[in-house]
Amino acid sequence: MRTRYRFGCLGLCIDVGLFRSIPMKDFKYLDLIEQIRKEFKIDYYGDHGISHWRRVYYNTQKLSSHYEIESEVFELFSLLHDSKRHDEFKDKYHGKRAACFVEDLLQVGSIVLNDEDAERLIYACANHTHSDKKNPLFNDKIVQICFDSDRLDIGRVGYIVNPEYLATNYAISLITGGQ
Ligand SMILES: [Fe+2]
């Protein structure tokens, strides 16, 4: 175990450059953010609110630039994966509700994605806490970047990021220093 673990999750996350976030002006889906905010059932500025979404989006950009992948899914996952929470705790079905919300948004044309990206976003939202590992999308790099970007922000609620729960080698290297 590296020395940096001794400083706890806050020191660790700062050390690897997490806790940074995307400025609001860099979001493309501002109307969607407003819709989510109006329908949001918990504290918009709480543990699973806008500040978390901004950090998750930052993390997706950090990981995806390493892998040289661009995708519309990253911003949408960041904004939507926790959008249908009913509480700040386990709320077992919040991912499934978010996936249903994505389907509704696709249906009415509020978001437009090709079929592959639509399936990625729906799967990533529905599976970001408990994953169906038999689904081939579990091994999709875009989906894995979404999952890791959310998990890299776990330090905000007092947990240390556990590399065993990360999917991409780059995210693991950020936490372990490549050890
Ligand atoms: Fe989250």
Image: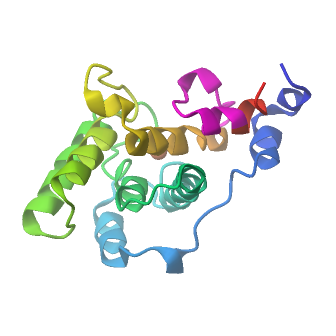
Residue 44 image point, x, y percent: 46, 61
Give percent across and percent down for residue 113: 21, 62
**Quadrant of the rendered image containing residue 179:** top right
**What residue appears at the point 31 percent right and 77 percent down from the top-left corner?**
31
Q: Is residue 107 above or below residue 140?
A: below
Q: Residue at x 60, y 44 (%)?
A: 153
Is 161 above or below relative to 15?
A: above
Farthest residue, direction right:
3
Total number of numbered labels? 0
In the rendered image, which quarter contains the N terminus?
top right
- View extreme (left): residue: 107
Q: Position of residue 96 (x, y in %)?
A: 24, 38
**Can the viewer see residue 88?**
no
- Tell me if residue 104 is in the magenta stretch: no
Q: Residue at x 27, y 39 (%)?
A: 123
Along the line of sight, the residue nearer the viewer: 146 or 84:
146
Residue positioned most to the front: 68
Residue 119 x, y percent position in the rendering: 21, 45
From which residue to which does the magenta span run? 158-173
> Is 178 left, or right, of 72 in this rendering?
right
Closest to the observer, 35 or 2: 2
In the displayed structure, would residue 101 be above or below residue 137?
below
Is 69 positioned to the left or the right of 30 in the image?
Answer: right
Is residue 61 visible to the viewer in this orientation of the structure? Answer: yes
